[in-house]
Image: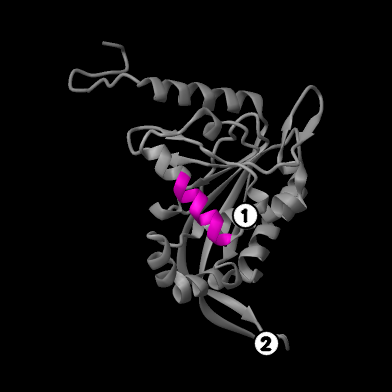
Amino acid sequence: MSESTNSGDEVIPFTKMRRTIARRMVESKAISAHTLMGKEVDYEGVELVRREHGARFRGEEGFGLSYLAFCACATVEALIAFPFINASVGDDALVVHHDINLGIAVDLEIGGLVVPVIHSARDLKLRNMALRIREVATKARTGRLSMDDLSGGTFTISNAGPMGTTFTGAIINQPEVAILATDGVGRRPVVIESSDGIESIAIHSTGMITVNFDHRAVDGAYVARFLSKIGETLRDRNWAGEL
């Protein structure tokens, strides 16, 4: 018994997966200059599409239309506009990846997680993005991921939102230079400004998105614009047209 345990404590050895995660997380913190930035975004346009088309989508595909699929599409659009975030740090240089291979962190509910990769994500619209997320998550939870499914990622999304989280600072998935976390979405009062400048209070669905980024690779202003682009896309894109 170590000095940090008492007689009534239970000692649970780390599994192989837990040891691997622990090692990689510590390595990532040692390698990258982690810097956290967050933004509250308005999901009301997304919410309206989910309400109007959600039942039909579930009937056609057999599962619900989650916020994550919208966030993933908006993130891809932002990565196209801000390519230095879809990158890795090489030998005294930034390696910008023109393919967007989106990692989706999947909780296995057994004390670990994996990050399967959606390859060529820039080509996916909302319905196909939702289908691909569902596919890789199902393969992860049923132990059917191949090495190809786990390799080649260029940017990762961590989605704790279904658990109702408020603000998440995820650890960068090396060798990438940033990771996006999506938190819980809820109904909240917001200030709405009309075209003639008149302000009013409305109830909208809003939530936080955060980015932990490697400050060696990019600066805060660049990441702030990246976050703003995601928020604008979530608010303004014609999502219904992609279903």
What is the three-letter code of the residue carrying label 2? Ile
**Mark on residue 198?**
2
The magenta segment is: 126-135
Q: Quadrant of the N terminus?
A: top left
Across the whole image, how many numbered discs are drawn on residues?
Answer: 2
Residue at left 61%, top 64%?
A: 234
136 in relation to 130, above or below? above
Left or right: 64 as drawn, with respect to 242: left
Question: Which element type, helix, strand or loop, lies under badge 2?
Answer: loop
Pointer 1 or 2: first along the chain: 1
Q: Residue furthest top?
A: 1
Q: Magenta segment, principal secondary structure? A: helix
**Mark on residue 148?**
none
Q: Which residue is mark 1?
A: 124
Left or right: 115 as drawn, with respect to 194: left
Q: Quadrant of the C terminus?
A: bottom right
